[in-house]
Image (tube, grey):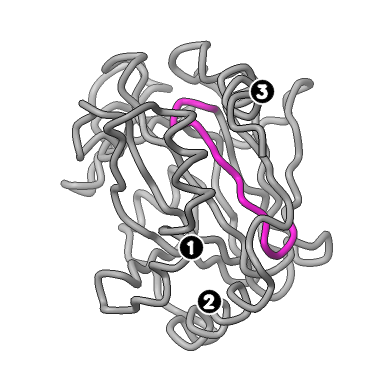
Amino acid sequence: MNYEALAQQFWRDGYLVLEDFFEPELMDQYQELIVRHFGSSPAFLHTDEFLNKSATEVIPWFPQQEGQNAFDVAENDPRLTALTEALLGEGWYSLYCMTMFSRKGTKGQAWHQDCDPEESAARFNVNRLIYTDDIREEVGGQTLVIPGSHRRGTITVGEVNEEFDDQVVLTPKKGTLVMLHGHTWHRVRPVVGGYRVSTNYRCCPKGTPEDITDVCVYRNMRYKFETSSVVEDRLAGGGA
């Protein structure tokens, strides 16, 4: 694996896609644990305001915080560690492992940035997303990204699920690793069949505050997760 070339690609595009990165047996083990945890119809944890304004219907689970040590295996993979260091340099650190579940008939996620570029272009998180099952056309839930958008500053104000000419559609298979810069514009299409699962091992460069992802920027608002509140209505051009 040419880590230097992958790092150059990441900083050019704001994301990386590495297929067949993890073994199918490990992905099957994770998928079983995830499905056992969520069941068929889990409840949302966010407020109705967030669900409506963000067009986001994703239910999180933090397995390592509940003693599910099996999820340490992927995080401690030496190839993932080496790749992360090639991207972020020495002193990077892990935030947490978060599994995201979207049930049939849900909206997915609207266009957003996981952290606010206005804070600092040098302060950001990286999503290290692994897929324990195929993202399939009949299920939906494809990830859309705008290449190079991590260098454009704050995401533009506009329609939350707009189709962009330069968007790229990612349809990861089981075992795929996606590395995604927190300032890269991205969204997830609606889940039309079955359910969608991904697991995110979030991390940050050295010196980045641990609460870097507390404020998420959508095309229509800034949202603060700590207080479960809209801190800026961007369509209105003012504070909440």
Query: Crowdedness of circle 1 by 10 Å Cα count: few (<14), some, many (20+)?
Result: some
Q: Residue at x 58, y 54 (%)?
A: 108
Residue 165 falls left or right of residue 215? right
Q: Residue 7: horizontal and vertical position, in percent?
A: 57, 26
Q: CA distance from mark 3 to mark 2?
A: 30 Å
Give yes or no for contact between labels 1 and 2 (Cβ–Cβ under 8 Å): yes
The front one of 104 and 33 is: 33
The image shows residue 137, relative to residue 211, as above or below, that is below
- Mark 1 or mark 3, which is nearer the start of the sequence? 1
Of helix, strand and loop, which one carries label 2?
helix
The image shows residue 1, relative to residue 99, as above or below, that is above
**Residue indicated by mark 2:** 30
Residue 18 falls left or right of residue 91? right
Give yes or no for contact between labels 3 and 1 (Cβ–Cβ under 8 Å): no
Q: Residue 189: horizontal and vertical position, in percent?
A: 67, 49
The front one of 109 and 177 is: 177
Give yes or no for contact between labels 3 and 2 (Cβ–Cβ under 8 Å): no
Q: Residue 144: horizontal and vertical position, in percent?
A: 67, 39
- The quarter of the displayed image where residue 206 is located: top left
The image shows residue 94, relative to residue 88, as above or below, that is below
Q: Please provide the residue range marked out in magenta.
A: 173-184
**Residue indicated by mark 3:** 147
The disc labelled 2 sits on which kind of residue?
Tyr
Residue that protrudes farthest toward the top in the picture: 152
Q: CA distance from mark 3 to mark 1?
A: 26 Å
- The quarter of the displayed image where residue 161 is located: top right
